[in-house]
Amino acid sequence: MNRGTMDDMNGMVRLPGRWLFALVFLLVASPSAAGIKVALLPAQQTVAPGDTFDLSIEVTEAGTAFNGFDLSIGFDPTALTFIQRSPVSQQEGAYFVAACPSQRFHQFQAAADSLAITDVLLCANTSVTGPGQIYRLRFKASLVPQVTTVRFLSRLAFYNAGVKVGPVTTTNATVGIGVSLAAPETPRDVPGLRLAAAPNPARGHVVLRIEADHAGLQRLVVTDVAGRVVRRFGEAEFPAGRRAVTWDGRNDSGQVVPPGRYTATLKTLNRSIQTPLTIIR
Protein backbone atom coordinates (compact mmCIF):
# COMPACT_ATOMS: atom_id res chain seq x y z
CA MET A 1 0.00 0.00 0.00
CA ASN A 2 1.50 3.35 -0.99
CA ARG A 3 1.87 6.37 1.28
CA GLY A 4 -0.94 8.31 -0.44
CA THR A 5 -3.42 5.50 0.12
CA MET A 6 -2.42 5.26 3.79
CA ASP A 7 -2.86 9.03 4.21
CA ASP A 8 -6.31 8.81 2.61
CA MET A 9 -7.30 6.01 4.98
CA ASN A 10 -5.97 7.92 7.99
CA GLY A 11 -7.95 10.93 6.85
CA MET A 12 -11.08 8.78 6.64
CA VAL A 13 -10.48 7.60 10.20
CA ARG A 14 -9.98 11.11 11.59
CA LEU A 15 -12.85 12.75 9.66
CA PRO A 16 -15.74 10.83 11.20
CA GLY A 17 -14.48 11.82 14.67
CA ARG A 18 -14.68 15.51 13.83
CA TRP A 19 -18.10 15.11 12.24
CA LEU A 20 -19.31 13.09 15.20
CA PHE A 21 -18.31 15.90 17.57
CA ALA A 22 -20.13 18.44 15.39
CA LEU A 23 -23.21 16.25 15.23
CA VAL A 24 -23.30 15.81 19.01
CA PHE A 25 -22.90 19.58 19.45
CA LEU A 26 -25.81 20.27 17.13
CA LEU A 27 -28.03 17.71 18.79
CA VAL A 28 -27.34 19.24 22.19
CA ALA A 29 -27.36 22.91 21.19
CA SER A 30 -30.23 23.07 18.73
CA PRO A 31 -33.12 22.45 21.17
CA SER A 32 -31.81 25.14 23.54
CA ALA A 33 -31.42 27.55 20.64
CA ALA A 34 -35.15 27.27 19.97
CA GLY A 35 -35.86 28.80 23.36
CA ILE A 36 -39.02 29.22 25.40
CA LYS A 37 -41.36 32.20 25.11
CA VAL A 38 -43.50 32.65 28.20
CA ALA A 39 -46.02 35.43 28.82
CA LEU A 40 -48.52 36.72 31.34
CA LEU A 41 -51.77 36.99 29.39
CA PRO A 42 -53.65 39.04 28.56
CA ALA A 43 -50.67 41.35 28.18
CA GLN A 44 -53.03 44.32 28.64
CA GLN A 45 -56.43 44.51 30.24
CA THR A 46 -58.65 47.09 31.93
CA VAL A 47 -60.64 46.15 35.05
CA ALA A 48 -62.99 48.10 37.27
CA PRO A 49 -61.77 49.16 40.74
CA GLY A 50 -62.41 46.33 43.20
CA ASP A 51 -62.90 43.71 40.47
CA THR A 52 -61.43 40.20 40.51
CA PHE A 53 -59.61 39.10 37.37
CA ASP A 54 -57.38 36.28 36.08
CA LEU A 55 -53.98 36.15 34.45
CA SER A 56 -52.64 33.13 32.58
CA ILE A 57 -48.98 32.10 32.39
CA GLU A 58 -48.56 30.62 28.94
CA VAL A 59 -45.84 29.34 26.66
CA THR A 60 -46.93 31.22 23.58
CA GLU A 61 -45.39 29.10 20.80
CA ALA A 62 -43.72 25.75 20.20
CA GLY A 63 -40.10 25.77 21.31
CA THR A 64 -37.61 23.86 23.43
CA ALA A 65 -39.05 20.82 25.22
CA PHE A 66 -39.37 21.06 29.02
CA ASN A 67 -40.99 19.09 31.80
CA GLY A 68 -40.65 21.54 34.69
CA PHE A 69 -40.32 25.20 35.59
CA ASP A 70 -39.32 27.32 38.56
CA LEU A 71 -40.37 30.97 38.45
CA SER A 72 -41.44 33.95 40.52
CA ILE A 73 -44.00 36.68 39.80
CA GLY A 74 -43.96 40.20 41.24
CA PHE A 75 -46.79 42.72 41.69
CA ASP A 76 -47.62 45.92 43.58
CA PRO A 77 -49.59 45.01 46.73
CA THR A 78 -51.04 48.52 46.96
CA ALA A 79 -52.69 47.96 43.58
CA LEU A 80 -53.39 44.20 43.58
CA THR A 81 -54.23 41.49 46.10
CA PHE A 82 -53.49 37.90 45.14
CA ILE A 83 -56.34 35.42 45.64
CA GLN A 84 -55.24 31.82 46.11
CA ARG A 85 -57.42 29.07 44.71
CA SER A 86 -58.43 26.13 46.87
CA PRO A 87 -57.12 23.55 46.44
CA VAL A 88 -53.96 25.21 45.17
CA SER A 89 -53.66 22.57 42.43
CA GLN A 90 -56.43 24.46 40.61
CA GLN A 91 -53.80 27.07 39.76
CA GLU A 92 -51.85 24.62 37.58
CA GLY A 93 -52.32 25.26 33.87
CA ALA A 94 -54.60 23.05 31.79
CA TYR A 95 -51.92 22.35 29.17
CA PHE A 96 -49.37 21.29 31.77
CA VAL A 97 -51.82 19.11 33.72
CA ALA A 98 -53.08 17.36 30.58
CA ALA A 99 -49.54 16.21 29.75
CA CYS A 100 -49.28 14.33 33.05
CA PRO A 101 -52.61 14.25 34.93
CA SER A 102 -51.58 12.22 37.98
CA GLN A 103 -47.87 12.63 38.72
CA ARG A 104 -46.58 16.14 39.28
CA PHE A 105 -44.42 17.91 41.83
CA HIS A 106 -46.14 21.22 42.57
CA GLN A 107 -44.95 23.80 45.09
CA PHE A 108 -46.42 27.26 45.58
CA GLN A 109 -45.63 30.09 48.00
CA ALA A 110 -47.29 33.52 48.20
CA ALA A 111 -45.76 36.62 49.77
CA ALA A 112 -47.21 40.12 50.03
CA ASP A 113 -45.73 41.24 46.73
CA SER A 114 -44.54 38.08 44.97
CA LEU A 115 -45.38 34.47 44.13
CA ALA A 116 -42.98 31.52 43.86
CA ILE A 117 -44.03 28.59 41.66
CA THR A 118 -42.41 25.23 40.96
CA ASP A 119 -44.16 22.59 38.84
CA VAL A 120 -42.62 19.43 37.40
CA LEU A 121 -44.10 16.59 35.32
CA LEU A 122 -43.12 13.23 36.86
CA CYS A 123 -44.56 10.93 34.18
CA ALA A 124 -41.77 8.95 32.51
CA ASN A 125 -40.45 10.33 29.22
CA THR A 126 -42.95 13.18 29.26
CA SER A 127 -42.20 16.75 28.26
CA VAL A 128 -44.02 19.57 26.48
CA THR A 129 -43.02 22.22 23.94
CA GLY A 130 -45.99 24.62 23.96
CA PRO A 131 -48.00 26.50 23.13
CA GLY A 132 -50.29 26.24 26.13
CA GLN A 133 -51.21 27.39 29.62
CA ILE A 134 -48.81 26.28 32.37
CA TYR A 135 -50.25 28.23 35.31
CA ARG A 136 -53.02 30.66 36.23
CA LEU A 137 -53.33 33.47 38.76
CA ARG A 138 -56.20 35.45 40.27
CA PHE A 139 -56.04 39.00 41.65
CA LYS A 140 -58.36 41.59 43.13
CA ALA A 141 -57.87 45.19 42.01
CA SER A 142 -57.65 48.07 44.45
CA LEU A 143 -60.26 50.82 44.59
CA VAL A 144 -57.79 53.44 43.35
CA PRO A 145 -57.71 54.06 39.56
CA GLN A 146 -54.18 53.44 38.30
CA VAL A 147 -51.98 51.46 35.91
CA THR A 148 -49.95 48.61 37.37
CA THR A 149 -47.87 45.68 36.15
CA VAL A 150 -47.56 41.99 36.97
CA ARG A 151 -44.08 40.83 35.99
CA PHE A 152 -41.63 37.97 35.89
CA LEU A 153 -38.82 38.26 38.45
CA SER A 154 -35.24 37.02 38.23
CA ARG A 155 -36.09 33.56 39.54
CA LEU A 156 -36.97 32.05 36.18
CA ALA A 157 -35.86 28.67 34.84
CA PHE A 158 -37.20 25.82 32.71
CA TYR A 159 -35.88 22.25 32.90
CA ASN A 160 -36.07 19.04 30.90
CA ALA A 161 -35.16 15.83 32.77
CA GLY A 162 -33.23 17.90 35.30
CA VAL A 163 -31.26 19.88 32.71
CA LYS A 164 -31.84 23.63 32.46
CA VAL A 165 -33.08 24.68 29.01
CA GLY A 166 -33.57 28.01 27.29
CA PRO A 167 -33.12 30.78 26.50
CA VAL A 168 -36.32 32.10 28.07
CA THR A 169 -38.07 35.22 26.75
CA THR A 170 -40.78 36.83 28.87
CA THR A 171 -43.71 39.20 28.38
CA ASN A 172 -45.19 40.99 31.40
CA ALA A 173 -48.81 42.10 31.89
CA THR A 174 -50.14 45.64 32.31
CA VAL A 175 -53.43 46.19 34.14
CA GLY A 176 -55.44 49.39 34.02
CA ILE A 177 -57.60 49.72 37.13
CA GLY A 178 -60.41 52.01 36.09
CA VAL A 179 -58.05 53.40 33.45
CA SER A 180 -58.31 52.52 29.77
CA LEU A 181 -55.16 51.09 28.21
CA ALA A 182 -56.34 51.85 24.70
CA ALA A 183 -53.87 53.91 22.72
CA PRO A 184 -54.56 57.59 23.38
CA GLU A 185 -55.73 59.74 20.56
CA THR A 186 -53.02 61.62 18.72
CA PRO A 187 -52.89 65.13 20.18
CA ARG A 188 -54.39 67.74 17.90
CA ASP A 189 -51.78 69.82 16.11
CA VAL A 190 -51.79 73.49 17.07
CA PRO A 191 -49.88 75.69 14.60
CA GLY A 192 -46.91 77.32 16.27
CA LEU A 193 -47.36 75.48 19.58
CA ARG A 194 -45.85 72.13 20.59
CA LEU A 195 -45.88 70.04 23.77
CA ALA A 196 -44.14 66.66 24.14
CA ALA A 197 -43.30 64.36 27.06
CA ALA A 198 -40.37 61.96 27.54
CA PRO A 199 -39.95 59.33 28.74
CA ASN A 200 -43.51 58.17 28.30
CA PRO A 201 -44.47 55.90 30.05
CA ALA A 202 -42.29 57.03 32.96
CA ARG A 203 -41.47 55.62 36.38
CA GLY A 204 -40.61 58.96 37.90
CA HIS A 205 -39.47 62.19 36.27
CA VAL A 206 -41.02 63.36 32.99
CA VAL A 207 -39.58 66.16 30.88
CA LEU A 208 -42.22 68.34 29.22
CA ARG A 209 -40.78 70.10 26.18
CA ILE A 210 -42.52 73.27 25.07
CA GLU A 211 -42.16 75.21 21.85
CA ALA A 212 -44.06 78.43 21.09
CA ASP A 213 -43.74 80.76 18.12
CA HIS A 214 -44.95 83.82 20.05
CA ALA A 215 -43.93 85.41 23.34
CA GLY A 216 -46.69 85.69 25.92
CA LEU A 217 -48.46 84.22 28.90
CA GLN A 218 -48.18 80.42 29.33
CA ARG A 219 -49.87 78.15 31.87
CA LEU A 220 -48.87 74.48 32.27
CA VAL A 221 -50.82 71.94 34.37
CA VAL A 222 -51.08 68.15 34.76
CA THR A 223 -54.49 66.56 35.32
CA ASP A 224 -55.61 63.02 36.22
CA VAL A 225 -58.14 60.82 34.39
CA ALA A 226 -61.00 62.56 36.17
CA GLY A 227 -59.79 65.95 34.96
CA ARG A 228 -58.59 67.09 38.38
CA VAL A 229 -55.45 69.24 38.42
CA VAL A 230 -52.70 67.39 40.28
CA ARG A 231 -49.76 69.68 39.49
CA ARG A 232 -49.57 73.37 38.56
CA PHE A 233 -46.41 74.85 37.13
CA GLY A 234 -47.47 78.47 37.48
CA GLU A 235 -48.50 81.11 35.01
CA ALA A 236 -45.94 83.52 33.61
CA GLU A 237 -44.71 85.41 30.56
CA PHE A 238 -42.22 83.52 28.37
CA PRO A 239 -40.35 84.51 25.21
CA ALA A 240 -40.88 82.70 21.94
CA GLY A 241 -38.82 79.56 21.49
CA ARG A 242 -38.20 76.33 23.33
CA ARG A 243 -38.04 75.45 27.01
CA ALA A 244 -38.31 72.32 29.16
CA VAL A 245 -40.16 71.67 32.42
CA THR A 246 -39.48 68.59 34.55
CA TRP A 247 -42.34 66.97 36.42
CA ASP A 248 -41.12 64.80 39.29
CA GLY A 249 -44.30 62.70 39.44
CA ARG A 250 -45.60 64.52 42.54
CA ASN A 251 -48.72 66.57 43.13
CA ASP A 252 -48.92 70.14 44.42
CA SER A 253 -48.66 68.82 48.00
CA GLY A 254 -45.39 67.00 47.26
CA GLN A 255 -46.94 63.51 47.34
CA VAL A 256 -46.05 60.89 44.73
CA VAL A 257 -49.00 60.41 42.39
CA PRO A 258 -50.31 56.86 41.84
CA PRO A 259 -49.60 55.02 38.58
CA GLY A 260 -52.05 55.83 35.83
CA ARG A 261 -52.81 58.08 32.91
CA TYR A 262 -52.40 61.84 33.13
CA THR A 263 -52.63 64.77 30.73
CA ALA A 264 -50.30 67.74 30.45
CA THR A 265 -52.01 70.88 29.15
CA LEU A 266 -50.28 74.04 27.96
CA LYS A 267 -52.44 77.16 27.59
CA THR A 268 -51.51 80.49 26.08
CA LEU A 269 -53.64 83.59 25.66
CA ASN A 270 -55.66 82.16 22.76
CA ARG A 271 -54.39 78.60 22.20
CA SER A 272 -54.00 75.35 24.11
CA ILE A 273 -52.39 71.97 23.48
CA GLN A 274 -52.37 68.65 25.37
CA THR A 275 -50.22 65.53 25.54
CA PRO A 276 -51.02 62.27 27.36
CA LEU A 277 -48.71 60.86 30.06
CA THR A 278 -48.53 57.44 31.67
CA ILE A 279 -46.92 56.90 35.08
CA ILE A 280 -45.91 53.36 36.06
CA ARG A 281 -44.32 52.13 39.27
Image (tube, rainbow, N blue to C red):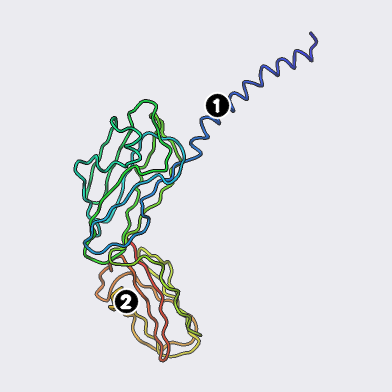
Tags 1 and 2 touching, CB below 8 Å: no
**Residue 262, how many percent across, how many down?**
34, 72
State the SS at label 2: strand
In percent of the image, x 39 and y 49: which residue is there?
A: 39
Q: Residues within 10 Å of mark 1 (few under 14, many from 20)?
A: few
Q: Is residue 187 left or right of residue 76?
A: right
Reply above or below: 120 against 262: above
Q: Quadrant of residue 14?
A: top right
In percent of the image, x 42 and y 46: which residue is there?
A: 60
**Residue 141, how many percent across, how many down?**
24, 59
Residue picked out by circle 2: 223
**Residue 257, how many percent across, how many down?**
28, 69
Can residue 148 be seen from the camera position used here?
A: yes
Reply above or below: 16 against 254: above
The alpha-carbon separation of the residues under discs 1 and 2 comes to: 62 Å
Q: Quadrant of residue 168?
A: top left
Q: Residues within 10 Å of mark 2 (few under 14, many from 20)?
A: some
Can residue 243 be seen from the camera position used here?
A: no
Task: Indicate the amino acid at tag 2.
Answer: Thr
Q: Is residue 51 left or right of residue 161?
A: left
Q: Residue furthest left?
A: 86
Residue picked out by circle 1: 24
In the picture, the disc for residue 233 is none
Task: Identify which residue, 186 or 29, lies in the foreground.
Answer: 186
Task: Indicate the amino acid at tag 1.
Answer: Val
Task: Identify which residue, 171 or 101, lies in the foreground.
Answer: 101
State the SS at label 1: helix
Name the N-terminal-most of marks 1 and 2: 1
Location of the N terminus (image quadrant): top right
Location of the C terminus (image quadrant): bottom left
Reply above or below: 204 against 40: below
Task: Identify which residue, 68 or 86, lies in the foreground.
Answer: 86
